[in-house]
Image (cartoon, rainbow, N blue to C red):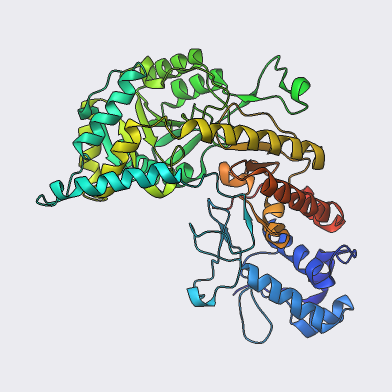
């Protein structure tokens, strides 16, 4: 039998909820929502009727009706007979959108602000959940125009190619060779983006219940892919740089760095089947792994018999011009993932895997259960883009430097109690919050015109409630609007003691 709450019991849990910092119905909805999030009100619990709760709280029925309606809109309360809805919890996607978990709710029944994974933010919201750039328009358009003239030569064929078009594989291989990693076309497998590449690799090398080492925090979609394959993430945390002067120089937090001792110990002792790392402007921290650590990591993975998978999708976004070698330069067994999504446009959906010829054949065999090859038109265009990979980068990197500087200045000015470290590249700043309120901020953010991805999306086991990733992919004027909205959302939490008390002892939230 499903649980239910009587009015006095819910009133006791609510405490002093009406503190006057927002309309009464909003304050009531906020506190109920956080009671559900921290587990003090169990899922599928029937809440008191509107009439009964209004009597217990000494407020109008209109207030309770509006609060329940707001909770239903956000996916925290089901629609039930009369007014006795049952508690639910929405699922936050990698993009920060909300998916209702009520199986009886159809797409048509969704309300504004609750969208499917992958959809753009509703109109009027500034999107800080994505860390992606718009297309380098003229360059991409020119590449597709050239590809269109080359397409007729491919039309007599079947159009299936699990390895990818040879011209594109040759061009990608030439880029690796020029970077100091001799590569042939037979060592390249073209994929439909980096996420597709990772799924192919996991399918080929890891089985259910196998351990997969990951950095902590890590890229949310990678964590999702690992879990979806039935593998067990083995999380190794970052550490704080010893003797780091960043905080004193920039007024921010000391930079996080890879804990090589912990990584090596995890590889030797746990012997995971696979390791997934992002050494180039790590997502979400923005950090860059130095060559000495890259060499150590390759050696440790080889000694443990672990397949080392390196995600280089952000490598081209080198804002400070720091020189490092590709990880594959330190060992022949490294598996590398690349993509055009960050340097040119995520809409291209073109990526690749670079590995030994034997591993590439293994990946190609695993791929056939997922698809039979990527779209040829996109691969023709991608070949042109890779040949001229550096063309759009100077202007793109210059704009990102300006955006980064603007964001760090805005955060320091408007949210001085948020700790930040200046990333050497990439697309985002990893912020440490003064309290474990990342999920709460994410939940109320749309009320202030922004969309966020909560810190726990980047972790295992509900970690990182004290962290928030803030991209600097928007121009400075939009970043200013977004930071001011973050300040307002923070003020709401600061001014609501019950919300702070609810969160103070809350367990870390794991929202998939």
Q: Is residue 76 visible?
A: no
Between 85 and 122, the one nearer to me in the picture: 122
* Percent position of residue 166, x then y: 19, 35
The answer to which image quadrant residue 67 occupies is bottom right
Q: Is residue 151 visible?
A: yes
- 377 relative position to 414: left or right: left
Position of the N terminus, as image quadrant, is bottom right
* Percent position of residue 361, x then y: 20, 34
Please name the residue shown 75% across and 25% down the image.
250
- 161 relative position to 304: left or right: left
- 218 relative position to 253: left or right: left
The answer to which image quadrant residue 360 occupies is top left
Please name the residue shown 51% across and 40% down the image.
219
How many marks the image carries: the answer is 0
Q: Residue furthest left?
A: 156
The answer to which image quadrant residue 307 occupies is top left
**Is 333 located above or below residue 58 in the figure?**
above
Q: Residue furthest bottom?
A: 82
Between 8 and 336, the one nearer to me in the picture: 336
Between 126 and 214, the one nearer to me in the picture: 126
**Is 58 located above or below residue 310 in the figure?**
below
Please name the residue shown 67% across and 49% down the image.
478
* Percent position of residue 165, x then y: 21, 40
Between 66 and 120, the one nearer to me in the picture: 120
* Percent position of residue 23, x then y: 84, 70
Please name the residue shown 57% across and 59% down the image.
121
């Amino acid at each position: 039998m499903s649980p239910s709450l009587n009015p006095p019991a819910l009133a006791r849990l609510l405490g002093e909820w009406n503190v006057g910092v927002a309309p009464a119905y909003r304050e009531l909805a906020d506190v109920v929502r956080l009671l559900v999030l921290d587990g003090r009100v169990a899922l599928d619990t029937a809440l008191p009727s509107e009439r009964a709760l209004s009597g217990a709280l000494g407020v109008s029925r209109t207030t309770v009706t509006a609060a329940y309606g707001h909770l239903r809109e956000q996916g925290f309360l089901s629609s039930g007979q009369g007014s006795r809805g049952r508690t639910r919890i929405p699922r936050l996607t990698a993009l920060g959108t909300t998916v209702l978990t009520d199986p009886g709710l159809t797409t048509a029944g969704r309300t504004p602000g609750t969208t499917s994974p992958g959809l753009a933010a509703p109109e009027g919201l500034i999107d800080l959940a994505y860390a992606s750039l718009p297309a380098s328009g003229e360059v991409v358009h020119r590449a597709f125009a050239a590809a269109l003239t080359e397409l007729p030569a491919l039309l007599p064929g079947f159009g299936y190619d699990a390895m990818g078009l040879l011209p594109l594989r040759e061009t990608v291989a030439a880029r690796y060779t020029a970077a100091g990693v001799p590569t042939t076309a037979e060592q390249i497998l073209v994929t439909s983006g980096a996420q597709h590449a990772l799924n192919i690799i996991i399918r080929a090398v890891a089985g259910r219940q196998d351990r997969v080492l990951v950095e902590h925090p890590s890229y949310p979609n990678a964590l999702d892919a690992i879990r979806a394959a039935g593998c067990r993430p083995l999380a190794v945390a970052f550490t704080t740089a010893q003797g780091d002067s960043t905080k004193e120089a920039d007024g921010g937090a000391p930079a996080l760095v890879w804990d090589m001792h912990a990584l090596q110990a995890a590889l030797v002792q746990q012997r995971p089947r696979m390791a997934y790392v992002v050494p180039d402007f790590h997502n979400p921290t923005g950090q860059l792994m130095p060559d000495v650590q890259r060499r150590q990591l390759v050696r440790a993975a080889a000694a443990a018999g672990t397949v080392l998978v390196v995600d280089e999708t952000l490598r081209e976004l080198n804002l400070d011009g720091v020189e490092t070698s590709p990880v594959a330069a330190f060992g022949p067994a490294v598996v590398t993932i690349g993509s055009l999504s960050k340097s040119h446009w995520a809409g291209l959906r073109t990526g690749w895997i670079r590995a030994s010829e034997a591993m590439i054949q293994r990946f190609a065999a695993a791929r056939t259960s997922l698809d039979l090859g990527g779209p040829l038109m996109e691969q023709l265009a991608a070949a042109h883009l890779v040949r001229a990979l550096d063309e759009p980068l100077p202007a793109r990197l210059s704009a990102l430097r300006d955006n980064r500087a603007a964001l760090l200045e805005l955060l320091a000015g408007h949210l001085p109690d948020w700790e930040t470290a200046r990333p050497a590249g990439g697309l985002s700043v990893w912020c440490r919050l003064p309290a474990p309120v990342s999920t709460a901020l994410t939940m109320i953010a749309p009320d202030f015109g922004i969309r966020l991805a909560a810190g726990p999306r980047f972790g295992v086991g509900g970690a990182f409630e004290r962290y928030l990733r803030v991209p600097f992919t928007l121009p400075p004027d939009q970043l200013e609007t977004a930071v001011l909205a973050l300040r307002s959302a923070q003020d709401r939490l600061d001014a609501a003691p019950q919300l702070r008390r609810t969160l103070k002892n809350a367990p870390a939230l794991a929202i998939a």
